[in-house]
Amino acid sequence: MSYIDKIRVQNEDYDIKDTALAEEVDALKLSKVNLQQDATNAGKMLIVGDDGNLKLGNLPVITRQTELSNVAYVRDGSDILPLKKCVVNVKPFQSGSGDPSPTNIRPITGWTGANITRCGKNLLDPERYLTSRVTVDGDSLVCKSSAYYSSIFTPNTGTKPIDISRALPIPVGTLTISCESIVSNTEGGSATLYVYTCDAGGDNKTNRGKLNAETLQVTFTMDAPGYFDLQMSSNTARLTITKLQLEVGDTATAYEAWNGVKAASDWSATAGAVYGGTADLTDGTLVSECAVTTIGALTWTYYDDANGKYFRTRIYGIPGVPNKTGSDAYLVSSAYKTVLPRIASIIDMPDCSIKENRYNTSPYGEYIYLRDLRFTTEADLKAAMGDVKIVYKKATSDSYSVDPAAIDVLLGANLFSADAGDIAIEYVADTKLYIDGEANKSSMIASSGISESRYFQIGDELYYSTTAISAGETIVPGTNCIKTTIAEALNELLA
């Protein structure tokens, strides 16, 4: 008969001694016990089986993964253990806003690293307020307006688009913004903050309501991930807001200061600038999928035919993807609006636009089309637009190993965002807390039928049914069950 050294009960390891059970312990705790089992049982836990009997079982691993979006919110009723993966979909960064055009050049830069932010219940990061117009004073924000700017996060006001490079990313679902007080320091000024959101692309700016002395809470629902902004009333020069909090849910809860950390992964020395790909910041795996070139570096042919007037260039090495809808989602230009295949053919391309066409498996059948009616020769196009950047997908991705970023995780609510692009999180639920949370949802109501003489758990408590309990029936210790402990159960199990 072999002995094991340890047994795991509810995520806690306990030493196995060569003596019988010596003392009573707390519910669901295991202390000194002589467990005569094969050594292969090491690392297992004592669980309530499907049949209601107490037995040794494998410690369950409950894995969750979020969708790829501008934020990743982790809660789902359970608390969590450290991350398994934190993947960022790296995208080229374009400064400015609106469609790129020859009169609205939006410079493109690649990423030489990625920063990820993790915060808890309060999603409002005070560092975002530290502008010339906003200062932090303990739990208060002191905001100063101007003739041009009234936004807390971004240099925009009124109906102007939200600048998503500075706005706060928020997840899908119901959110609540609240404060303890809001006071205007301007005589006759309006103590009002207007709540705005937009979608993940910075469009569809929507007024969600306002915070003022009479209304200290605004609740709104995001059907898709997007961005959040607050704007002051234009007739107020100075505003003091106390205990401002944005949280997930439909009710304002007790204020908590922003509890966040930032982690960084730097790949500048290894991979240089990356214009598109993925980076797993937890294990340091970087995949570079895109390359950058300029109009001046390519060879363009001018056409004037049934499709209109346009330029065409062939980029060798792009993998052949026949009729792949939306394949040019990788195509980004600093001066021309990208037209997707599913939206328009060549003849439908508007002026000052660019388009990709991959129509067969040969690398010679892949082209980029450009329409700029100001030019009719390659020389004129390059002379005026030669420095314009174009990002496109490479034939073969390059993989790099970079230093992973250390990302701490909170028990409870966690919101993740990255500056380099969309993000997805994979994590492992804390088994005990998850089980407790699921059990506590039903409180003392049986969610399913329980046979007589069966063990079952509610939260941290272990019970033994003395009669059969029907689904939906109230569980009453002393009437249809008795409260017991792991120690008492083990005495019978090991007898």
Image (cartoon, rainbow, N blue to C red):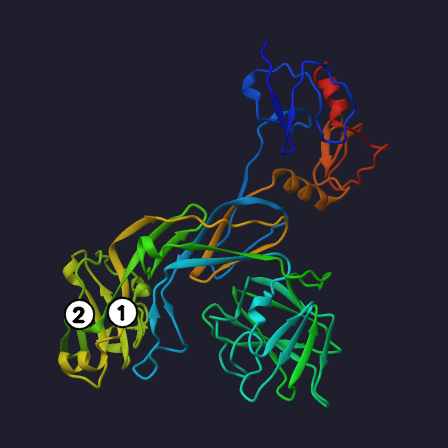
| Residue sitting farthest toward the top | 1
The answer to which of 258 and 394 lies nearer the viewer is 258
* Residue at left offset 13%, top offset 80%: 379
Report x, y in % for residue 357. 23, 66
Tag 2: residue type? Leu
Residue count near mark 2 (Cα–Cα under 10 Å), binned few <14, some 14–19, many ≥20: some
- Give yes or no for contact between labels 2 and 1 (Cβ–Cβ under 8 Å): yes
* Residue at left offset 43%, top offset 48%: 404
Alpha carbon separation for disc pair 2 and 1: 10 Å
* Residue at left offset 33%, top offset 70%: 108
The answer to which of 450 and 141 lies nearer the viewer is 141
Task: Judge from the rendering whether residue 422 lies leftward or rightward of residue 252; answer left or right.
Answer: left
Task: Judge from the rendering whether residue 138 lies leftward or rightward of residue 281; answer left or right.
Answer: right
Report x, y in % for residue 95. 39, 73
Q: Residue 320, located in which quarter of the rendered image?
A: bottom left
Residue count near mark 1 (Cα–Cα under 10 Å), binned few <14, some 14–19, many ≥20: some
Helix, strand or loop status at disc 1: strand
The residue labelled by disc 2 is 298
Report x, y in % for residue 166. 50, 71
Residue 389 in the image: above or below residue 89: below
Residue 381 in the image: above or below residue 15: below
Quadrant that contains the C terminus: top right
Residue 156 in the image: above or below residue 489: below
Tag 1: residue type? Ile
Tally of numbered discs: 2
Report x, y in % for residue 315. 18, 64
The residue labelled by disc 1 is 390
Q: Residue 306, located in which quarter of the rendered image?
A: bottom left
Instruction: Please tell me which of labels 2 and 1 falls first in the chain.
Output: 2
* Residue at left offset 42%, top offset 61%: 420
Residue 288 appears in the rendering: no
